[in-house]
Image (cartoon, helix red, strand yellow):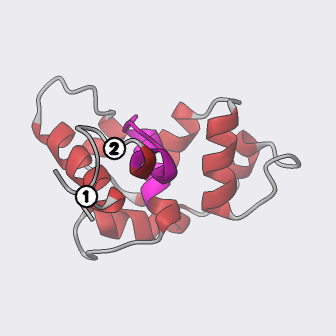
Amino acid sequence: MPENYQDAVLAAYKQKKKEEGSGLPLNLLKPTTVKLKRECLKRYDKSDEAKNVFSDFFDVDRLDTEFHEYILGKDPDDFKALLNHLQEKTTKTDEKNTELLAWLIDFKPRPSIAYYTNPPGGTLSP
């Protein structure tokens, strides 16, 4: 099991992508920046978790932002770093990209603090 949250989330994404019937959204099977944006709009809800994820990803105030409208107005290139990571053009990415991917694929436990506090399969080795 990967001990690093970013590695664990990416591994979970790859595993879901390989498994037929895994429930991975179509927009994530062959992602593009436009498809990542679409999936964010499709999955958006007004939960605190969604607001926190988008607030961190876009670096905006979660209380003063209507995220559905905000995401609609964003350039798909805002998702380029995440796409590069999914396509393994990069080995590491910003934490905000990992948190967004974890939310999009329903990775548990999330966010990263929950993963490190209570990792799947038991404690992490030092």
Secondary structure at badge 1 equals loop
Q: Residue furthest front?
A: 126
Q: Is residue 15 visible?
A: yes
Q: Nearer the viewer, residue 6 or 33?
A: 6
Q: Amino acid at mark 1?
A: Glu
Along the viewing direction, whichever of 8 and 24 lies nearer the viewer: 8
Q: Residue at x 28, y 33 (%)?
A: 24
Q: Main secondary structure of the magenta part?
A: helix
The residue under the point 39% across, 72% down is 93
Q: Is residue 74 visible?
A: no
Give the Cα separation between the discs numbered 1 and 2: 8 Å
Q: Identify the residue shown where x is 35% and y is 41%.
A: 27
Question: What's the mark number on residue 53?
Answer: none
Span shown in magenta: 98-115
Question: Secondary structure under badge 2?
Answer: loop
Does the CB distance between marks 1 and 2 fall below 8 Å?
A: yes
Looking at the image, residue 48 sits to the left or right of residue 107; the answer is right
Establish if 85 lies above or below 111. below
Image coordinates for residue 60, horizontal then vertical, percent = 76, 60
Pointer 1 or 2: first along the chain = 1
At label 2, the amino acid type is Pro
Find residue 105 and report its horizontal and vertical position in percent: 37, 38
Figure quadrant of the C terminus: bottom left
Mark 1, Cα crowd under 10 Å, few <14 / some 14-19 / many 20+, is some
Total numbered circles: 2
Residue 3: mark in rendering: 1
